[in-house]
Image (cartoon, rainbow, N blue to C red):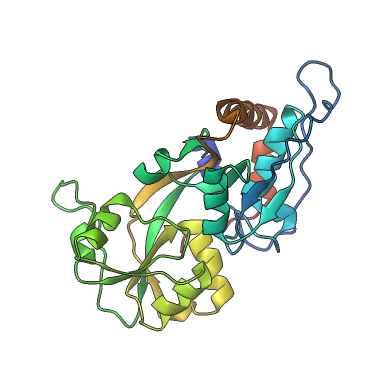
Amino acid sequence: MRSSAAGAVLAGLLLCIAPAQAQVPVSETGGKEPAPAPYTGLDLVTGSDYAPYTGDDLPGGGLVTDLVRRAFAVGGRRYDVRFMPWKRGYDGVVAGRFLATFPYIRTPEREREVLFSDPVMEVRQFVYLSDRSGMEFHGRTGGGDSGGLEDFQGRTICQPVGYALPAGLEAMVGQGRLTRQTPSDLGACVRMVATGRADVLVIDEFSGAAAIQRSGLADDIRVADRPFAVVTLHLVVGRATPGAETTVAAFNHGLETLKRQGVYHQLLLSHTLQPAP
């Protein structure tokens, strides 16, 4: 997702600052904006209810939507972005009905179906706990590699449709050691945790903070002191899509150009992010 310098920027950002407009970079060669590439007939797709990254109600469609559009624009590629349920959009990308979707973390299952771009951002995942539950998360203990998974034993975790559980937790669900609830969206998961219908939600710190603020249920949810993991978010293209590798390479080039020209940094500032509590 981001460099360590960008990470330092993220930690100091405050919510509800009016978004500023960042400039689309000019061509590296001629000083003029490149001509649009021929329309491919395929759109980009993403989901809503994932502030501050994506959402049809967010300025510019959210931070990652804005980054994706501008990264492709560096090479003259102009794409429409459609918002729809996460699973429908992802399945459409795998089937070749859409060109790409974002932002997604890597999982072994997804690796078999899609190509991943360079990291668009890097974020920490935190453990959000119900005040009605006696569950605690202690993180890594005793120098082992379990990452605190034992704290989830016998509990109920909420995972919105279209989202992915960390690999260790997914394995626990498969083993029957952890129960999973899968409501339609992140807001529903926040409500389930707040009311005690689920013990825990594992989500990145910024979207978690935004979803809890929107719900008005902050007094009913605890945040574990230690992060669960650090993950990266990516744009993904279906492996069977013609020109998939070229599309990913064009995006990676545009993303690197945005960082080099300072536009990436401007967008992090203009799309406000709230640090973890």
Comparing 224 with 190, the one in front is 190
* Residue found at the far top of this picture: 29
- From this view, report whether residue 143 is shown above or below residue 241: below
The residue at 42%/78% (across/down) is: 192
Q: Is residue 275 visible?
A: no
Q: Position of residue 119 (x, y in %)?
A: 51, 37
**Quarter of the view holding residue 44:** top right
The residue at 58%/61% (across/down) is: 85
Count of numbered badges drawn on the protein: 0
The residue at 55%/27% (across/down) is: 245
Q: Is residue 161 visible?
A: yes
Q: Position of residue 176 (x, y in %)?
A: 20, 65
- From this view, report whether residue 197 is shown above or below residue 268: below
The residue at 23%/65% (across/down) is: 152
Comparing 138 with 106, the one in front is 106
Q: Position of residue 154 (x, y in %)?
A: 20, 71
Comparing 262 with 65, the one in front is 65
Q: Position of residue 64 (x, y in %)?
A: 62, 47
Q: Is residue 34 left or right of residue 202?
A: right
Q: Is residue 181 left or right of residue 51?
A: left
- From this view, report whether residue 123 is shown above or below residue 133: above
Comparing 38 with 129, the one in front is 38
